[in-house]
Amino acid sequence: HRSFATDIFTQIRLVSHRLLQQYWRSPSYLFPKFLLTVFSELFIGFTLFKADRSLQGLQNQMLSVFMYTVVFNTLLQQYLPLYVQQRNLYEARERPSRTFSWFAFIVSQIFIEVPWNILAGTVAFFCYYYPIGFYRNASESHQLHERGALFWLWSTAYYVWIGSTGILANSFIEYDVTAANLATLCYTLALSFCGVMTQPNQMPRFWIFMYRVSPLTYFIDATLAIGVANVNVECADYEYVRFSPPQNKTCGQYMQKYIKSAGTGYLADPSATDECKFCLISKTNDYLRSVSSTYHHRWRNYGIFICYIVFDYAGAVFLYWLARVPKNSWINRVRDRLIKLTSRKAKD
């Protein structure tokens, strides 16, 4: 009297295996996904190849992290038509014949998409992290392995988040184009208020909540800090502030109190007496504070970002059930179960 021939775990295992085979046999989806990842990340990495630790170099590295996120829209639009095709096939053929349940369908979609996104995120990590020069900062701070592993975790999590956002947007919407427009709108809002184009202290108080709820706030905060934290700044020659010290004083004597009170900045030659060259920032951590980022929040931010992914997948399952699962059949099953229990009690 069960609705399906096997239990839900067997259904998920068999449907996931079938979907894995279908992905492997669908080069029209996987090849563009990885080609886009390789070319876009290599383009960003070699456009800002081995950015240095000057003030402009730090700006370039922050810009590269910002550009890293722009792959969102294209990857999302590659995935949604495939998902809609699978969903239409299930709802037209396999759900009416009771081949497997809706829960097995949606969970299998999640299980199989995640490994491919982790693989794509790994490819993106190698194509971006080393050309941009983040490994040199990690080596300079004696954190080469730790920070490399952390950035890999963030890279893979970002690609998984793209997939989770796609399935959430399309779980209750009929057409993939409409779902893509909705996801793009949410992504644009998240990107606009992530703290790069406008710092949080410059945002109107009404919009500060967007800075706090945007997942890209935590992504850019953590990845930028992992990439550049804990090393010295080396100003380029044109970035120094130049001035003359008072007579009978060296630049170091003249600027000593200011540097001590400001807590940042350094002189190119403290013993100079004719012209002082002063760099406004001495540590990359000072730069990170100016853009509301800190290395100490790296694990906190990662946990928050994972919560966004879990929320997306849980929301996708719930909204699919709410919008696309026939409720009459569910009510009928409950009714049949109650009738069976009542009849058993009557016999007893």
Image (tube, helix red, strand yellow):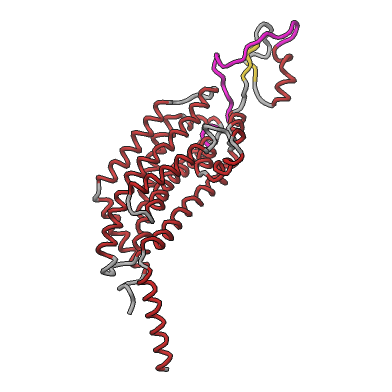
226 displayed left or right of 18:
right
Judge whether 234 appears above or below 26 on screen.
above
Q: Along the line of sight, which residue is nearer the eye, 194 or 118?
A: 194
310 displayed left or right of 268:
left
Residue drawn at point x = 70 percent, y = 22 percent: 259
Pick the quarter of the image with the C terminus. bottom left
Measured from the top left, where is residue 206 in percent x and y? 59, 41
Measured from the top left, where is residue 203 in percent x and y? 58, 35
Is residue 192 located in the magenta-colored stretch of the structure? no
Pick the quarter of the image with the N terminus. bottom left
135 displayed left or right of 35:
right
Residue drawn at point x = 43 percent, y = 55 percent: 313
| Quadrant in the picture for residue 254 | top right
| Magenta residues (range) | 225-250
Measured from the top left, where is residue 139 in percent x and y? 52, 32
Measured from the top left, where is residue 292 in percent x and y? 59, 35
Residue at the outermost bottom position: 348
Q: Along the line of sight, which residue is nearer the eye, 37 or 311?
A: 311
- The image shows a total of numbered marks equal to 0
Judge whether 38 appears above or below 153 on screen.
above
Is residue 239 located in the magenta-colored stretch of the structure? yes
110 displayed left or right of 255:
left
Residue drawn at point x = 30 percent, y = 55 percent: 20
Q: Along the line of sight, which residue is nearer the eye, 232 or 57?
A: 57
Judge whether 233 appears above or below 25 on screen.
above
Secondary structure mostly seen in the magenta stretch: loop
Residue drawn at point x = 25 percent, y = 49 percent: 26
